Image (spheres, helix red, strand yellow):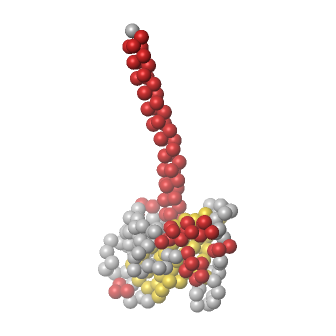
Amino acid sequence: MKQLETGKQKVINVTNLFLVIVLMTACATSPLLMKNETRNDLAYEVINLLSLSDNGLFYKTLKADHPSIYGMMDYNMINENNRKESVITEMDRYLDFDTIFNASQRMELDHKLKNLKIVHLDRKQLKISKLRYEHTGTGRLERITFPIFQQDSKGNLYAFLFYSWSTPKRMNGASYIYIFVKHHDIWEKLSTVFVSIT
């Protein structure tokens, strides 16, 4: 009888242990999921700051080694070449990001910029009615990177995003890196890096 009770107690203990492990796992992963969802929402907030055209934005983002941005998504390049509005009228850089981010934040940001991945865009989260699925056709073709985020030591959040547009057969076009900062839940364009013009 005692052996039977001992056996039942072991089953109960194992069951309780299993439930504790499941609850601990759920608690540990919930903040991560919430963080990822929040970052995704923030990314679409930033993308929607752009003046995008219907059927212009390509359905997937550029990755770090794409020929049109290779070597451009680099912390030092952005730090040296950012301007408030125009590279033509402004000779000196607008911001020294070394005064905004500490050494570890700069390294973290540079790593993120150099390891951009392709993301298939969710049209439902965009302020356009249609994405583009081919490079040919009429109208402007727009390409972007998925936004990269970096927080400074004061808790301010910055977003970095590459944007390019071109006409059919690439007769005209331009590309930029935009830097945004979030103040009191509102995104503001902080500076721009001119990349190229055709």
Q: Quadrant of residue 86?
A: bottom right
Q: Quadrant of the C terminus?
A: bottom left
**Residue 187 position in % (x across, y down):** 60, 67
Q: Where is residue 78 drawn, in percent x and y?
A: 56, 78
Picture layout, residue 43 above or below residue 21? below
Image-based side of 72 in relation to 188, left or right: left
- Left or right of residue 89: residue 196: left
* Residue 43 point in image, percent of width and height: 50, 63
Q: Residue at x 39, y 18 (%)?
A: 7
Which residue is pictured at 40% across the width and 23% down the height?
11
* Residue 132 shown left or right of residue 183 in the figure: left
Q: Quadrant of residue 158?
A: bottom right
Quarter of the image that includes the N terminus: top left
Asked if residue 131 can be seen in this view, the reply is no
**Residue furthest to the top:** 1
Q: Please tell me which residue is depicted at 60% across the width and 66% down the height of the picture.
A: 105
Picture layout, residue 58 above or below residue 41:
below
The residue located at (46%, 84%) in the rendering is: 174
Q: In this view of the protein, which residue sits in the foreground, 78 or 164?
A: 78
Image label count:
0
Residue 125 higher or lower than 137, as above or below: above
* Quarter occupied by residue 100: bottom right
Above or below, 20 against 123 in this view is above
The answer to whether residue 191 is seen in the rendering is yes
